[in-house]
Image (cartoon, coloured by chain):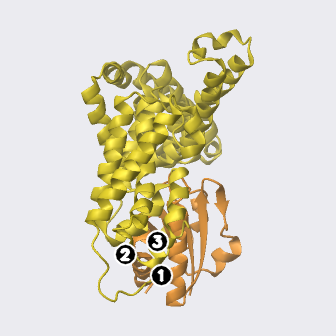
Chain colours: A orange, B yellow
Amino acid sequence: MYLVAVCSCPVGIAHTYMAAANLKKAAQQKGIEIKVETQGAQGVEDEITDEDLKRCDGCIIASDVKIKNSSRFKDVPTMSFTVNEPIKDAEAVINELMEALG
Amino acid sequence: MAEIQRKKQKSLGTVIKDAIMTGISYMIPVIVGGGVITAVAKMMGGYDIGNTAAEMQTLAQVIFTIGNSLFGFAVPCLAAFIAYAIADKPGIAPGYAMGVLAGLMQTGFVGGLVGALIAGWFVLQMKKIKVPKALQGIMPIMFIPVITTLVVGLLMWYVIGVPIAWLMGIVTAGLTALSAGSRFLLGAVIGGMIAFDNGGPVNKTAALFVNGLNADGFFIPTSAKMCAGMTSPLGIAISTVLPWSRKKFTKSEKEQALSLVILSCCYVQEGVIPFQLKDPIRLTASICIGGAITGGLCMMLGLESPAVHGGMFSVAMTSNPLLFIGLWVLGGCITGLLYSILKRPLAEGAEDEEMDNPLI
């Protein structure tokens, strides 16, 4: 199982990175590989590449703003969350996507 | 996007909120940059340099003009990226137009916001129109910007903008004429909301209002917002070192105190969230009271902050840096003291569990 995620928030200095950190931690505990792209005030970091897109099974978008370059996920099962959801409970976010993926 | 629908769908309200937040996220560097540069010019050349800046004789006047040229983009930028969030790239051009139009009509940020939402929606509808293949390519670069800007622009100028301009006139006149008591009340509401959820929806609602007023040139509510927001991390840090409450915190919580002070100096409230999740009611009550008192006093004393972000790095730009620091520390002490009393002691033999704080 390989997931990708994009985190973003209005100011881009705190929530973005807290959500990213929590998603990585929860995925690690569940033994799932994840790559998290952050779109904070500094711009895009850890960008999800075409290779990641080919390989991934699902995508989590945790954002309160419109994310950059969202059209690249058109062939990936994608689920959108607010940025606060993974901050409160990242495991539930991952579980919800896994359930939907079946 | 191969979007999987969740059980609860995104409501229209969420779509609009996300669009506004996108606009704000692009506007923030503009108002911070422009606000700080004009504040530097004010420090160099006196507080009313804005009236004489057009002369361009002194360095201060030139710096003011540079800062102002960035600041002038605040509302257009907000509007452009609200429309972008709704309608993607074709929304940007009409959005900019609505922002500039809002400035000309004296409708402030509210006018830009409403105009951009309508423009974004209009572009979205135009994108649905089926056109012959030969015309498809020039739809987004020719027909969409021309028709959207013209139709929504005329609509704003003759219909929707009029009541907004009237309303903003009342709000701005009201804000400048507020009595000390009502200023305190408004500041306290702003401060309490800013402190309430540390960057969550309530905080963002208050910040939207304050940043919008800042983009329209009202700098007093901004000090209430920033100063109040800075009190929460400081307050929690204080409560971890007070002698009677030290034992109520775990070791890893106490280790975060210094980092919380640094976060507070940078006006990053979010470091408080891990504490808030653990003990929501008591902690929220403490930070709200501290924030409300600081925010209220900021507005009552007429403290101006042209910069909407920056914490300690923009204190020098405020109209009274010492007062700002004083109110910040005061609010922090109130929050810290309250929480040190309200917080429950650690349970007997409680595990010293590791607390993750991704910001630290």
Mark 3 Cα-neighbour bin, 10 Å: few <14, some 14–19, many ≥20? many
Mark 1 Cα-neighbour bin, 10 Å: few <14, some 14–19, many ≥20? few
| SS at badge 2 | helix
Residue B94 lies left or right of residue B227; in this view the side is: right
Q: Quadrant of residue A86?
A: bottom left
Q: Which numbered disc covers residue B254?
A: 3
Q: Which residue is label 1 attached to?
A: B354
| Camera-nearest residue between B317 and B201 | B317
Evaluate whether label 2 is on the same chain as label 1.
yes
Residue found 50% across the figure and 53% down from its top: B264
In this view, the mark in front (2 or 1): 2
Count the marks.
3
| SS at badge 3 | helix
Q: Label 1 near label 2: C-beta < 8 Å?
A: no
| Camera-nearest residue between B118 and B254 | B254
| SS at badge 1 | loop
Residue type, label 2: Lys
Residue A94 lies left or right of residue B88; in this view the side is: left
Residue type, label 3: Lys
Q: Position of residue B329 (x, y in %)?
A: 44, 47
Which mark is first along the chain, 1 or 2?
2
Residue A31, above or below B100: below
